[in-house]
Amino acid sequence: MEHAKLYERLAERLSKLEKFPRIKEDKSIATLMEEHGISRRDFMKWAAGVTAMLSLPSSFTPLMAQAAELTDRLPVVWLHMAECTGCSESLLRTDAPTIDSVIFDYISLEYHETIMAAAGWQAEHNLESAIAKYKGKFILMVEGGIPAGATENYLTVGPHGQTGFASAKKAADAAAAIFAIGTCSSFGGVQAAYPNPSNAQALSKVTSKPVINVPGCPPSEKNIIGQVLHYILFGTLPALDAYNRPKWAYGLRIHDLCERRGHFDAGEFVQEFGDAGAKKGFCLYKVGCKGPYTFNNCSRERFNQHTSWPVQAGHGCIGCSEPDFWDNMGPFEEPLGNRLYHTVYGEGADKTADKVGVTLLAATAVGIAAHAAIAAIKGSGKTEE
């Protein structure tokens, strides 16, 4: 009954959105898919996958497909701050156009410095025009940390010499919904690492409006596009965790769904990179994997068109979707429990647990370390092979 009411409400919202004019009148999402050789069957399979990812019943798949086709009604402004453009690259760098990247290319052309042709004065004019034309209607996506305070001018953008802080604030004030894309925009990222000479800040420090954080270095294309589709479907913010991350994407730890979890439970660990355990796909905890402390869906969604992810490739998770990961999670090739002294990376395992923000992590770190030790003893015959 609840699902029926929700379905009816979402269908009504999409029906209203369908009456909005397309941003580009000459082409639709459906036409664009056809031009890129994406069949309707593939499109519906993709819609079913996104529906499941957002924890919606499979019967909502037609609504998800309709929402994707209506993204051409939704203006998106994407700003680049202090970053490496890796979040955009997560969507754009594919060996063949994916449905996610096609949608992204199409809806983001109102303003996106990486993929638009305009530069200089013309680019700045495009941004100002988009903000004015779609005030209160556009989605704002910001990539990168933002220098503030006395060092605000460390990031100066465009021919008018406007600071990144001022540019982001102006856009945020006019946006209908705001997404911090990537860890730099969500939490400051590497730019905010100790001693943070530029005083880089998260996007949420720039505006008093709600900001949905989509962290990762970079986040997967599904996590980025999923936010847009959720907003189109519901018109509201998703359920969020303590760090304003959507629970549908960041509700579970990397460790919970990791393909190496069975080896962890069996006490089968890689002792050093390149050893026999590494060749057999053993758990990477002892060479620094931070999966037990990191909330993200990388182990389920993966990267590069869902073919692989760092742990599958042989390197442990570095905890990049957590606040202040650069300080709190390093050194990246050592277990968190081994950190007993202050370094430029942080201040020891106990204080790190507090900084990460989940109080239980202190007990969890000890518990995981103990489990690893006990399991290794029990399975010592296996780990020495």
Image: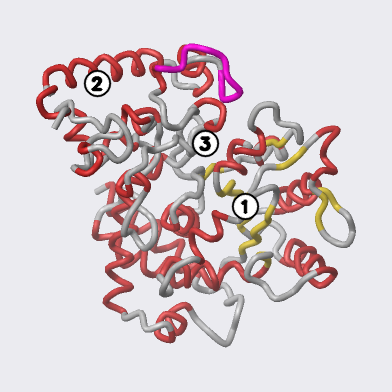
Instruction: Please determine whether, in this image, residue 5 is positioned above or below residue 371.
Output: below
Instruction: Bin the neighbour count of mark 3 within 10 Å (Cα to Cα): few under 14, some 14-19, many 20 and up.
Output: many
> Spatial distance from mark 1 to mark 2, Cα to Cα?
36 Å
| Mark toward the start of the polypeptide (2 vs 3) | 3
Residue for point 43% across, 74% down: 97
Residue 31's disc number: none
Which residue: 34% across, 18% down? 364
Q: Is residue 23 magenta?
A: no
Q: Is residue 237 left or right of residue 380?
A: right
Relative vertical location of residue 368 with respect to residue 109 in this rendering, above or below: above
Q: Nearer the viewer, residue 244 or 262?
A: 262
Q: The disc labelled 2 sits on which kind of residue?
A: Ala
Q: Which residue is mark 1?
A: 84
On the image, which quarter does residue 258 sit in?
top left
Q: Amino acid at mark 3?
A: Asn
Q: Position of residue 161 (x, y in %)?
A: 88, 55
For the residues labelled 2 and 3, the Cα–Cα distance comes to 31 Å
Q: Quadrant of residue 114?
A: bottom right
Task: Tell me whether the residue at label 1 lies in contact with that at label 2, contact meaning CB atoms closer than 8 angstroms.
Answer: no
The residue identified by callout 3 is: 244
Tell me the residue that label 2 is attached to. Answer: 372
